[in-house]
Structures are given as structure tokens and as C-alpha cells.
Amino acid sequence: MASRGKYLLWVLLSVPALLFVHRYLTSDIWAGDLLHPTGELSARLIILALMLTPLSMLFRGHGWIRWLLAHRRAFGVAAFGYALLHLFFYVLDMETAQAILAEALALGIWTGWVAFLLLLPLALTSNQASMRALKTGWKSLQRLAYPAALLTLAHWIFVHDDMQAALIHFAPLAALQLYRFVHISRARSWRGHRSATT
């Protein structure tokens, strides 16, 4: 039953990608028209994956949050997959390496490249074999998702010159991470106070 849910999740995560590719191959749409939807979906999946830990603190013990946590790696890998599709359409839209290099140092562009490069090792190590091989280093590597998310936010803002839309998407993540920080700080303070009085 659990494996069936896992496969169903992967099917659901794959459907938008299939629709994007089908739309590109069967219509007169430009590759550039698919840049925003693929990039936005990648950003949303990054946000979802990073929201799950603080959400589990808010909704401790609920079955739905346990299920989402158990499949968090799927959301992270899917986020990279849509970032890769976003890059694919970007290359098609730019057409030449010269055009890509000409704008590579623009703030809205290099932030996207660096975010993609940070997501790459996370996607490649999102498997049980890598977890066993890296041991405690695996969790440290996964923390690259946070700077990747910040760079994705910057990429969104400066490419589209639209801070409002980007912040609307990332505000829930920021609020939940703040809650997580406060929650952990209070727990540590309470443990320190308790050990000092015993």
C-alpha cells in the first residue's frame, strides 16, 4: 500500500512535465513561453520540501504530515527535475552558447545557475545508497537546499522584476522557518534551565 502511494505521487509529480513537453512539441508555442511555468513549479516544490519540517512541528502526530515527510525526497528530486526542464527550455530559447554566455553575469541569471548547481548534488544523493555512504554528511549536504532556495528567490525577482509575486510564494516558507527557529531556541533554553536547576 505504501509503495502504491509512492508511485502515485511520482505520477502526479510527472504530469505537469509531460504536459509542458507535449505542449511544446504539438503547438506553435515558443520555448521561452514555458520558462516561467517550469521555473515557478520548481520553486514551489523547493518551498514545499523545506516547509515540511516546521509543519511537522506545528502538526505533530498527524498522519498527513508524516506521509509528506516520508516522501520529502520525492518533492526535492521533482524540484530539481523541473529546474532541469526550465534549463532545457532556456537553452532552446537562447539558441546559442554565445547568447547564453553574454548574459551569464546578469544578477537574475547567475543566481539561477548557482541555484541549479546547488540542487544538482542534492538530487544525485537523494537515494538510500548515498545516505548510507555519506552517513552524517548526508544531512549537511542537504542543507544546501536553503541557499538554493534564497538564490531561486533572487532569480525570480530579478528575471521578472516582480518582487511581490516572488515574496508571496516564499513568505510562508520564511514564516515557518522563523517559527522553527523560535521553537528550537525555546526548547534549548528550557533544557538548559532544567539542567541548571537539577
Image (spheres, grey):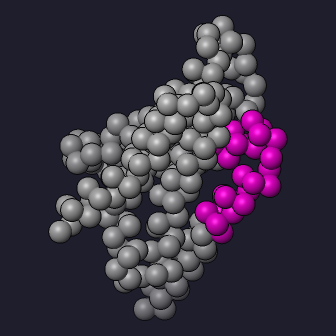
Magenta extent: 151-175
Residue 170, magenta (yes or no): yes
Residue 102, percent from left and from top: 72, 13
* Quadrant (top left, top right, bottom left, bottom right) of the C terminus: bottom left
- Residues 137 and 57: in front is 57
Q: Residue at x 47, y 47 (%)?
A: 16
Viewed as shown, does residue 141 lie left or right of 180?
left
Relative to 156, is 93 above or below? above
Tell me residue 190's x, y (percent): 52, 84
* Rendered residue at 45%/74% (across/down): 56
Residue 188, can we see it? no
Which of the 4 image quadrants contains residue 86?
top right
User: Magenta stretch mostly in which secondary structure?
Assistant: helix
Outermost residue on the front side: it is 27
Residue nearest the viewer, comparing 194 with 36: 36
Quadrant into which the N terminus falls: bottom left
Side (left or right) of 95 relative to 24: right
Residue closest to the eye, 177 or 156? 156
| Count of marks, rendered view | 0
Name the residue: 60% across, 28% down: 28
Q: Is residue 48 magenta?
A: no
Q: In this picture, is 164 found above or below 61?
A: above
Q: In this view, does 181 lie to the left or right of 195?
A: right
Q: In this view, does 89 lie above or below 14?
A: above
User: What residue do we see at 77% from left, 40% from top?
Assistant: 160
- Asked if residue 102 can be seen in this view, the reply is yes
Q: In this view, does 164 lie above or below 83?
A: below
In percent of width and height, residue 91 lies at: 57, 21
- Give the percent coordinates (x, y) of residue 6: 27, 59
